[in-house]
Image (cartoon, helix red, strand yellow):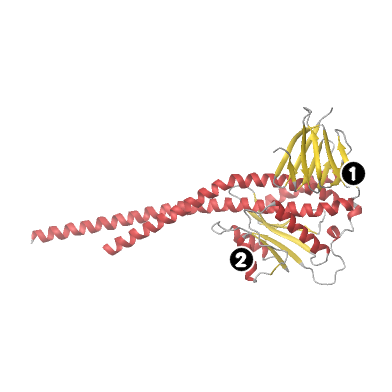
């Protein structure tokens, strides 16, 4: 699977900044799965348990508060003031 | 003569104890600089990302009518400005607090939200504008993202309710360990140059370079805004993005100001320590001269007595 750059950012710093192959989050319109090459768009995130898959196949889970998802041609950014990575 | 020696000894001791204090404060400030700049870098990357989304939204025609962008046009009453003033929790940081307050005095603010103990004390004195009921008198060092979020939500509510027409912020931009500039920025309503610095005490060349950079950034943003899709609609994204934007700008400004405060304090304490050492050396010289003079005097008196 093709990979892209994922940044999960909070005001206190980045919770994750690296490559990923898939991101699953919940937007206002429903659940979203973002793969490489997705059309650039911006949407509002709803509080939910989310996860992303690393190129190695490992799944990482995180809890996300309300925020913004910014999908650009080469990178994806999750912006929220409340994000906590599970298992950290 | 001995009274003079005693006075000098007391002054040397007093300068020494002041030196202990300035050295300790310098060490504490040096220790805090690293952490403060790390936190600053983290908040900058977040606020830059939120700012890029908001700048793109501000250019969207669907959002043009929003009070966040258009402002409260048609409001007949005088413009009410809410000014957030970020200063330090303590003094002894050179001109850090005074520069921020001088800049805050140039704005005719109707309400003030102070952040930092010095700023709170100034607002409570009531001589520089009314303290806003939205304020909680936050300290700067332990200011958390949650505090910024709660404050920004209260400001947005008050802004949409028509109680405020303009939101501005006075903070100190951290350029380097040696340079910090007090800056005044407008947060709401947003204009095309979202949160541009309206006034700063930087040199002309720096301002010129900033303008060139801003133009290049604006061109890049226009290009990216054109290709951006907002789901479900630009208005819906704007509604969520503005409190997030405000909170990130406030938190970022507090982190910038705190890093500036620590750097200014370290520099001030470094100068104080150097001056203290020079003062102590001069006093020691004076003391030794006086002591030597007293001894010589005593010998002369003894010799004169023996000769009689």
Determine whether, in the image, residue B173 is placed left or right of residue A35.
left
Residue indicated by mark 1: A30
Letter of the chain that mark 2 sits on in the rendering = B
Label 2 neighbour load within 10 Å: few <14, some 14-19, many 20+: few
Q: Quadrant of residue B71?
A: bottom right
Q: Quadrant of residue B185?
A: bottom right
Q: Secondary structure at mark 1?
A: strand
Which part of the image, by quadrant, shows the C terminus of chain B?
A: bottom left
Letter of the chain that mark 1 sits on in the rendering = A
Q: Is residue B291 visible?
A: yes
Q: Residue at x 46, y 54 (%)?
A: B21
- Per the rendering, the mark at residue B279 is none
Q: Where in the figure is residue B120, as x and y percent of width and height?
A: 63, 64
- Per the rendering, the mark at residue B121 is 2
Determine whether, in the image, residue B83 is placed left or right of residue B10.
right
Q: Nearer the viewer, mark 1 or mark 2?
A: 1
Measured Cα–Cα span from mark 1 to mark 2: 48 Å
Q: Secondary structure at mark 2?
A: helix
Q: Is residue B215 visible?
A: no
**Viewer-side residue, B60 vs A11:** A11
Q: Where in the figure is residue B208, as x and y percent of width and height?
A: 72, 50
Determine whether, in the image, residue B97 is placed left or right of residue A69.
left
**Viewer-side residue, B95 vs B210:** B95
Which part of the image, by quadrant, shows the N terminus of chain B?
A: bottom left
Outermost residue, left side: B308
Q: Residue at x 74, y 37 (%)?
A: A17
Label 1 neighbour load within 10 Å: few <14, some 14-19, many 20+: few
Q: On screen, B136 above or below B48?
A: below
Q: Residue at x 75, y 50 (%)?
A: B211
């Amino acid at each position: 699977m093709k990979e892209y750059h994922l940044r999960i950012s909070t005001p206190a710093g980045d919770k994750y900044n690296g490559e990923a192959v898939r991101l699953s989050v919940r937007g206002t319109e429903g659940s979203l799965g973002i793969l490489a090459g997705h059309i650039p768009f911006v949407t509002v995130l709803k509080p939910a348990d989310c996860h992303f898959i690393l190129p190695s196949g490992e799944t990482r889970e995180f809890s996300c508060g309300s925020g913004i998802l910014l999908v650009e041609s080469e990178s994806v950014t999750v912006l929220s003031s409340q994000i906590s990575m599970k298992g950290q | 003569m001995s009274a003079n020696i005693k006075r000098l000894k007391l002054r040397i001791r007093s300068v020494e104890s002041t030196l202990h204090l300035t050295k300790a404060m310098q060490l504490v400030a040096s220790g805090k600089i690293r952490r403060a700049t790390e936190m600053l870098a983290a908040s900058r990357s977040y606020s830059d990302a939120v700012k890029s989304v908001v700048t793109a939204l501000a250019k969207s025609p669907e959002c043009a009518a929003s009070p966040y962008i258009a402002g409260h046009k048609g409001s007949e009453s005088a413009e009410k400005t809410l000014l957030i003033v970020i200063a330090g929790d303590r003094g002894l940081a050179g001109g850090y607090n005074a520069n921020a307050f001088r800049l805050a005095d140039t704005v005719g603010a109707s309400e003030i939200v102070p952040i930092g103990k010095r700023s709170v004390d100034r607002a409570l004195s009531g001589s520089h504008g009314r303290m806003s009921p939205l304020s909680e008198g936050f300290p700067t060092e332990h200011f958390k993202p949650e505090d910024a979020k709660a404050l920004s939500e209260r400001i947005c509510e008050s802004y949409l309710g028509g109680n405020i027409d303009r939101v501005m912020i006075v903070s100190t931009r951290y350029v380097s360990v040696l340079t910090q500039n007090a800056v005044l920025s407008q947060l709401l309503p947003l204009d095309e140059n979202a949160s541009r610095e309206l006034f700063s005490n930087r040199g002309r060349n720096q301002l010129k370079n900033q303008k060139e950079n801003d133009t290049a950034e604006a061109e890049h943003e226009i290009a990216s805004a054109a290709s951006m899709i907002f789901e479900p609609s630009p208005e819906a994204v704007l509604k969520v993005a503005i409190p997030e934007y405000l909170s990130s700008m406030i938190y970022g400004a507090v982190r910038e100001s705190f890093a500036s405060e620590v750097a200014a304090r370290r520099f001030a304490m470094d100068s104080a320590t150097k001056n203290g050492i020079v003062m102590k050396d001069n006093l020691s010289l004076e003391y030794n001269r006086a002591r030597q003079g007293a001894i010589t005097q005593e010998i002369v008196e003894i010799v004169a007595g023996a000769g009689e």
